[in-house]
Image (cartoon, rainbow, N blue to C red):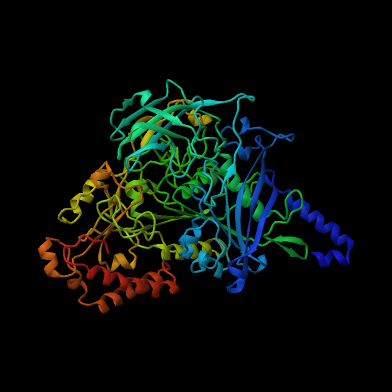
Amino acid sequence: MNGIASKCPLATVFAALVLALWATAGLAEVTRLEITSRAPLAGGRAFGTAGAYERVTGRLHYAVDPAHRANAPIVDVGLAPRDGDGRVRFSGDFVLIKPVDAGRGNGRLLYGVNNRGNLIALNVFNDAPWSNAPGSAADLGNGFLLERGYTLLWSAWNWDVVGGGGRLRIDLPVATDDGKPITGAVAAEITVDHAADVRPVAWGGSRGYAPADPEEPGARLTVRAAPEDKRRDVPRGRWRFVDARGVPSAPVSIELDGGFRPGMLYELVYTAKAPRVVGLGLAAIRDALSFFRYAAADRAGTPNPLATDGAKGPQPAVRTVIVYGFSQSARVIQHMVMEGLHVDEAGRSVFDAALIHGAGAGKGSFNHRFAQTTRHPSHAEDHLYPADVFPFTTTAQRDPVTGAAGSVLAWARKRGRVPLLFYLSTATEYWTRAASLLHTDVTGRRDIALDPRARLYVVAGAQHSAAAGGGRGIFENCANRLDYRPLARALLVALDGWAAEGREPPPSRYPRIEDGTLGPVSEYRRRFPALPGLRLPTGNLRPPRLDLGPRFAARGIQDLVPARRGRPFATLVPLPDADGQDRGGIALPAVAVPLGTYVGWNLRRKEFGAPGRLGRWQGSFLAFPATEAERRSSDDPRPSIAARYGSKARFVESTRAAAMALQRRGLLLPGDVPAIVARAGRAYDAVTGRRPGSRACP
């Protein structure tokens, strides 16, 4: 652009006009890009054809028009403070990792929705260590995303994040009633794994809502053993709110005389103050993507770091946007699409495709008054928060109990703004996150087809997080160490090819009612091999239909606190084969050529309370006997490793064949096969090298 301007004044005027038009194309926008640091990444190392990368960090300053129809879904946006132009302003952190020369990238922006302020994508796709400030080569793991030329972006959305640890934070405005404070009842469920005297009212690194009156006599703390049990009152004199001593980001906490007992469900209901306009966090994601995708500069003329000079002035270097979320942040994506918050005020889709990883069938408490964004139902916790709410499927269905009808894509389909969707689920999501509701009716009697623009891939036997440690922790069984990150990489490449080049992705792979691979827990228990001493789950998450009061549906105000529990939705689980392995999903090499049974559930040990309760995110690994003699002595009905393979060499070659078969189907990348085979060899030594009868985890 500078070269053109130096030769022709008219070109300068034209370029300035282009800049102004591009910068103001949207109405809700990033008005100011505040860059606080800009530094070479990994010491200036070159990554593939994209060359050297840099990390840019700072704050994004937003302005939202509360009267615009694109913002109509945002609860209480009309009650937020406004500036002289009538717009609502707020700001939040961002991290951008980009090629130094943006034009050398692959034209794809991968946006990672942060999870409680934490960056996730590099761990999943790059096998990188957890870091919220990636800068060194070690922080980037295997370099996968950068070698392929991706630009990476994270930005803050959740006001409730506790400070520290480099977590991304955003300042969302407080809703008021014509300037007068708003208060309301809040329910906070508290559980502990270890005895404690003081606990935050929220969990997951969240601040929670401050009490309107810490001495409120009507505040109520109750305790019960299970969600359906009768609540027993804890005397008001036995507990109190704990002073945070003026630390603004400290979590709101209570102290209980005699302490909280492990495994029990404590529920605090109190009057809170200062509700944030939580839904503006979803708008912040939308508008951050809109800026980096479409804008040349902010209102002050600070250039978009992703803009490149072209013959007609600044041009966007981003041609395709893919968003990725894991667990909570995956539910954020699902919620945004359901409410149409993936389309900016100018009517443009801000992303083309989404990889929704580990969300189950959930959305979240992301857009209502006094929303608690970290809450979600699990097997026996947090059932009374509006996260797992109808509709669940990508195509239409009707709830015969309530008469409600719809799909999560109804808004997007009506307006022609349906993104491409990949759902990646593990076995754990069927046990503790109601994942079957993604593809069955709410009675659990029939399969529901996916929308043509959606695919579902289920990792048989996997737990929520990949590559966990091998110990037991508070659970009965060894942890599930199945590492499905190579599959995640392959799926990202497939989604990229579908979104950017129109290449058809691999077909969906998930258990179904019609082929007998999906069924109720009672059938799972009937089919599972009888392993001596192993307790099986007696249930899974069946989220209840909730009555939140008369104003919730239209205005996002919850009048019934806690919510009134209704009839639960029917949920199903993948059914096992003779070894106990899940059927119907993607059998990774470790499951197709197994050394033990991988399952998506684990039960708490008695000494940690609630021994019948499933871990929220944990699976199990149940090793096979090494020899037939060991099998007979332990009464294990599953064939031994020696009987299955005969030798380590045969096992390794079988693993290689299974990996190559998945590679041919587009479910593994060639570069991941050698590492998978090598890992299998090490696992063979660990499992077969144990002392017979040992309970040590390999």
In this picture, is 119 found above or below 652?
above
Q: Which residue does the image show at 33% across and 49% down from the upper left?
A: 430
Q: Is residue 459 left or right of residue 501?
A: left
Q: Residue furthest front?
A: 245
Quadrant containing the N terminus is: bottom right
- Report x, y in % for residue 264: 30, 36
- Report x, y in % for residue 177: 61, 25
In this picture, is 387 found above or below 217?
below
Q: Is residue 504 visible?
A: no
Q: Is residue 285 visible?
A: yes
Q: Nearer the viewer, residue 170 or 426?
A: 170
Q: Residue furthest bottom?
A: 649
In the picture, residue 239 is in which quadrant? top left
Q: Nearer the viewer, residue 592 or 465?
A: 465
- Report x, y in % for residue 208: 48, 36
Quadrant containing the C terminus is: bottom left
Total numbered badges shown on the rendered structure: 0
In this picture, is 265 found above or below 162?
above
Q: Is residue 637 left or right of residue 118?
A: left
In the picture, residue 376 is in which quadrant? top left
In this picture, is 531 found above or below 384?
below
Q: Which residue does the image show at 52% across and 44% down from the upper left?
A: 161
Q: Is residue 151 left or right of residue 491?
A: right
Q: Is residue 298 left or right of residue 280?
A: right
Q: Nearer the viewer, residue 516 or 114?
A: 114
Q: Residue furthest top?
A: 217
- Report x, y in % for residue 21: 76, 51
